[in-house]
Image (tube, rainbow, N blue to C red):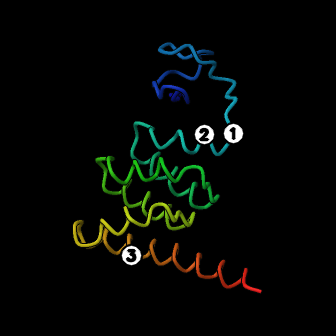
Amino acid sequence: MIVFCTECWHETDSSHRTCPRCGANLAINPHSYEEKLTSALDHPLAEARVRACWLIGLNNVQAAATKLMSVVESDTDLFVRRAAVQALGKIHARVAVPLLQSLIGLEDHWMEAEARKSIHHIEHDSATVERSSEP
């Protein structure tokens, strides 16, 4: 079976105990689940990056906001970028609002619609928090 090293993403056979490229122990990964999800945003397969974005949103991984923003700005796959935009909305990444606003009018209609939805999620969440903290 083929596996990817979670340190350098080198494709290798599952029978190896260590990565032939970087030497990482393939059986032990000391990183937290959230760190692994964030790291998976660098996976060589677009499908894995989309899945990582979805899981980051589902698990509300706030620490991934900066990395998700980088994916939106630089990933070459439109589906990955769209998934990152959606994840930013799901984790209510307020810091991403200017980036999401910059997608409106400059991107295709599909990406623009996702950016608007994410902005709505972020702003709606902020308004709800502010109302609930009032005396």
Characterize the local packing of mark 1: few (<14), some (14-19) or many (20 or more) Cα atoms within 10 angstroms: few
Residue plotted at (32% across, 47% down): 74
Q: Amino acid at mark 1?
A: Ser
Residue 94, horizontal then vertical, whole percent: 51, 65
Q: Amino acid at mark 3?
A: Arg
Q: Secondary structure at mark 3?
A: helix
* Residue 16 placement, left or right of 12: right
Answer above or below: position of 25 versus 74: above
**In-front residue for pair 125/78:** 125
Please tell me how many numbered marks the rendered image carries: 3
Nearer-N-terminus badge (3/1) = 1
Characterize the local packing of mark 2: few (<14), some (14-19) or many (20 or more) Cα atoms within 10 angstroms: some
As drawn, the label of residue 36 is 2
**In-front residue for pair 81/27:** 81
Quadrant of the frame with the N terminus = top right
Answer above or below: position of 112 versus 80: below
Q: Residue under circle 1?
A: 32
Characterize the local packing of mark 3: few (<14), some (14-19) or many (20 or more) Cα atoms within 10 angstroms: some
Mark 3 to mark 1 CA distance (whole Å): 31 Å
As drawn, the label of residue 73 is none
Nearer-N-terminus badge (3/2) = 2
Residue 97, horizontal then vertical, whole percent: 43, 67
Q: Mark 1 touching mark 2, by CB under 8 A?
A: yes
As drawn, the label of residue 116 is 3
Residue plotted at (28% across, 47% down): 76
Residue 83 sits in quarter? bottom left
Residue plotted at (45% across, 47% down): 49
